[in-house]
Image (cartoon, grey):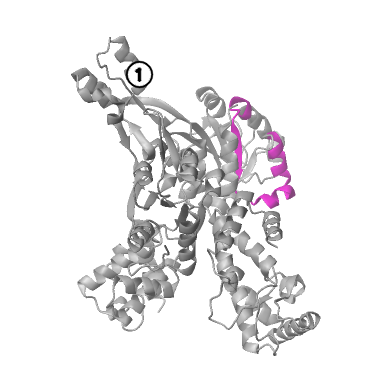
């Protein structure tokens, strides 16, 4: 039975290993946890899940597998109205609820009750769980992804069943929240240490060598401490469609500023052309020629673009395509030049990855950058940094 | 040996299960959670509840795994040799024992706390795999193998600043301390301030959870900040009514600086309070 459970977890995308599974079995044999499903849930999570971002996934998988095991007394009788309401209230956010009310709350509840009765009939004599699943009106209408799940003992009694049904760790799944601290951790992947600056650390090997050379008389040698020596060029798209992403860009920017000592940043609008700027207030008067930058910063700099790459394809592919000025060469040419100058490059896109296939301009830029476009989520950022830290 | 919480520490059922599983299956227990949820405190409480010695190893960004086992103080040996000290003939005089060595050779079982393992270099946990797994290590300088007489109970805390390697995680149990809900929080406060008046406590918790719900706070106040704040309120003898104005309007709670430790958060909160007042 438990082997199936283990495989089920594996299929649900949890990174579980045989060793952890054996630990679980060992614990069960030694009666570490009590006989109740609550204890088993906690113990299985303790053994098999090693990252709170997976708690949500584990809860779902656990509920799917053990959904039929737990007993729910009281379902033989008619479902109380109040209880149904409470159920729906717990699962729906206010907005969805308002829409629901419009559809006719009573009717919906009626349907739900009928469906429950029907399913009950099928599981004759069973005191089992009833999940209305995706076929319920709730699920269909998309108010709640899994549909309304019915279950649990009397209200207020906190059993683990409710804990996993509630999926409390929902917020922690790793592609949503971005705070500067999290970004910094992701950026840390790009560290490359080198010794520069004042000599203030004892160099033991050097001291031994020097002492030996000195015929045994102690000769202390010092050396500089290790510092992050990675160099980064950051090109940020500002204005227009990027206004929706200002907050996340600010966070990324401030994280970069504190994480990288050698950071140069420039702004562009939609696509890069012959010049960029450093100060948006003086963007018309003080512009920097891109060719100058290419000569100034060597190929050891890592190139990071931040932009939604959402524009008309003309702005990339044609001369005079820019919406701001008459450009003599198309943006694509400039992009290719930059990628040639700085081979380690990545493009971070704050637009959700699932929307990318629908935008022509995103596809073009992905082609130009050689598919080095990454979504601006924590997971995407990590992928980008891992890519950048590869030696070219 | 079973841990059931202690009079100073409220442990939820899942946390007790985690601790007891770690004790009886002799696996290290890795603990994560929001700052201030009592991760470090747990090891201290388990040690004192079970009557065991606690050995603490606080990790810094410069800590090396070797330092937890032992260090060979080559520089003082070199110095001594220059001065002609006799101790210099025996290399073991210059081996400094680390926390794990002390735990391994202790005649009684011990509790070892490896605090904030994520502060160290990314390779740090990998360097401890075998030591934590087999509870033994080899001392190259003196050609001896140190083996644990009693496997210590190991607690490891992490603040999630770095990802830990899979091989390391597979050898540990993992528990994430959820932020306590209102009832648990009440128990926690009861433990710290036994005589606190019901009215004051419920007002204070109201304010506290209200603060935590404000979107956009840089640092949400945590359990330890609540405890500090209550301590201040009790010391100043502030009546419960002062936490909320008589007409129920929002006011800045007294001594809010104990809860919000960030200037921007403070400003944000002041603005919200001012707005709430204007709208009345």
Tell me residue A102's x, y (percent): 68, 81
Which quadrant would residue A9 be assigned to in this image? bottom right
| Residue shown at the point (62%, 85%) measured from the top left | A83
Above-or-below relation of B30 to B181: above
Main SS of residues in magenta: helix
Tell me the chain of label 1.
A
Q: Quadrant of the N terminus of chain B?
A: bottom left
Task: Using the rendered view, name the quadrant where residue A56 is placed.
Answer: bottom right
In the image, is B242 to the left or to the right of B206?
left
| A185 with respect to B226 (left or right) | right
Question: Disc 1 marks which residue?
Answer: A206
Q: Is residue B231 above or below residue B104?
A: below
Quadrant for the C terminus of chain B in the image:
bottom left
> What's drawn in magenta, residue-wise?
A339-368
Q: Give x and y (percent) for residue B129.
A: 50, 41
Compare residues A382 and A215 and report the one nearer the observer. Answer: A215
Nearest the eye: A132 or A100: A132
């Amino acid at each position: 039975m438990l082997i199936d459970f283990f495989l089920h977890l594996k299929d649900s995308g949890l990174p579980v290993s045989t060793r952890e599974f054996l630990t679980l079995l060992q614990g069960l044999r030694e009666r570490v946890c009590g006989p109740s499903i609550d204890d088993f849930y906690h113990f299985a999570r303790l053994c098999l899940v090693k990252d709170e971002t997976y708690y949500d996934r584990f809860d779902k998988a656990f509920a799917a597998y053990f959904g039929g095991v737990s007993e729910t007394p009281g379902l033989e009788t008619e479902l109380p109205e109040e209880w149904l309401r409470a159920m729906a209230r717990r699962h729906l956010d206010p907005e969805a609820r308002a829409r629901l009310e419009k559809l006719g709350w009573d009717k919906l509840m009626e349907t739900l009750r009928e469906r429950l009765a029907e399913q009950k009939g099928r599981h004759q004599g069973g005191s089992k769980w009833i999940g209305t699943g995706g076929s319920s009106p709730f699920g269909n209408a998309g108010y709640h992804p899994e549909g309304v799940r019915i279950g649990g003992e009397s209200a207020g009694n906190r059993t683990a069943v409710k804990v996993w049904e509630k999926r409390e760790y929902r917020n922690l799944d790793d592609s949503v929240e971005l705070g500067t601290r999290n970004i910094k951790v992701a950026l840390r992947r790009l560290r490359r240490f080198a010794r520069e600056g004042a000599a203030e650390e004892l160099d033991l090997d050097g001291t031994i060598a020097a002492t030996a050379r000195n015929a045994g008389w102690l000769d202390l040698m010092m050396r500089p401490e290790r510092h992050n020596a990675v160099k980064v060029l950051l090109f940020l798209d500002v204005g227009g469609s990027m206004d929706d992403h200002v907050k996340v860009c600010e966070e990324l920017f401030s994280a970069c500023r504190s994480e990288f000592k050698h950071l140069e940043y420039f702004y562009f609008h939609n696509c890069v052309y012959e010049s960029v700027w450093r100060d948006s207030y003086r963007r018309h008067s003080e512009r920097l020629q891109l060719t100058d930058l290419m000569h100034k910063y060597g190929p050891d700099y890592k190139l990071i673009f931040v932009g939604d790459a959402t524009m008309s394809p003309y702005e990339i592919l044609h001369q005079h395509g820019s919406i701001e000025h008459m450009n003599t060469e198309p943006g694509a040419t400039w992009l290719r030049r930059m990628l040639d100058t700085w081979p380690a490059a990545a493009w971070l896109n704050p637009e959700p990855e699932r929307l990318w296939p629908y935008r022509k301009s995103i596809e073009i830029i992905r082609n130009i950058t050689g598919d080095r476009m990454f979504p601006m989520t924590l997971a995407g950022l990590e992928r980008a940094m891992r890519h950048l830290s590869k030696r070219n | 040996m079973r841990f059931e919480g202690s009079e100073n520490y409220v442990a939820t059922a899942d946390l007790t299960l985690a601790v007891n599983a770690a004790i009886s299956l002799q696996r290290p227990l890795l603990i994560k959670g929001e700052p201030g949820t009592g991760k470090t405190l747990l090891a201290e409480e388990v040690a004192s509840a079970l009557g065991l010695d606690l050995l603490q190893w606080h990790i810094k960004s410069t800590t090396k795994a070797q330092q937890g086992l032992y260090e060979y103080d080559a520089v003082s040996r070199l110095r001594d040799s220059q001065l002609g000290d006799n101790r210099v003939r025996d290399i073991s005089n210059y081996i400094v024992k680390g926390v794990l060595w002390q735990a391994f050779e202790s005649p009684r079982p011990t509790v070892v706390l490896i605090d904030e393992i994520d502060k160290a270099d990314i390779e740090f946990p990998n360097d401890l795999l075998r030591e934590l797994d087999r509870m033994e290590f080899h001392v190259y300088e003196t050609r001896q193998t140190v083996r644990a007489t009693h496997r210590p109970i190991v607690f490891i805390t992490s603040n999630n600043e770095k990802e830990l390697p899979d091989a390391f995680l597979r050898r540990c149990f993992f528990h994430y301390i959820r932020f306590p809900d209102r009832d648990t929080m009440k128990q926690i406060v009861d433990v710290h301030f036994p005589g606190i008046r019901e009215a004051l406590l419920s007002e204070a918790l109201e304010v506290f959870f209200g603060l935590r719900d404000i979107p956009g706070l840089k640092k949400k106040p945590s359990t330890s900040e609540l405890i500090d704040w209550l301590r201040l309120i009790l010391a100043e003898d502030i009546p419960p009514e002062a936490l909320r104005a008589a007409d129920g309007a929002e006011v800045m709670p007294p001594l809010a600086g104990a809860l919000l430790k960030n200037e921007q958060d403070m400003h944000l909160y002041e603005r919200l309070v001012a707005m709430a007042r204007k709208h009345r």
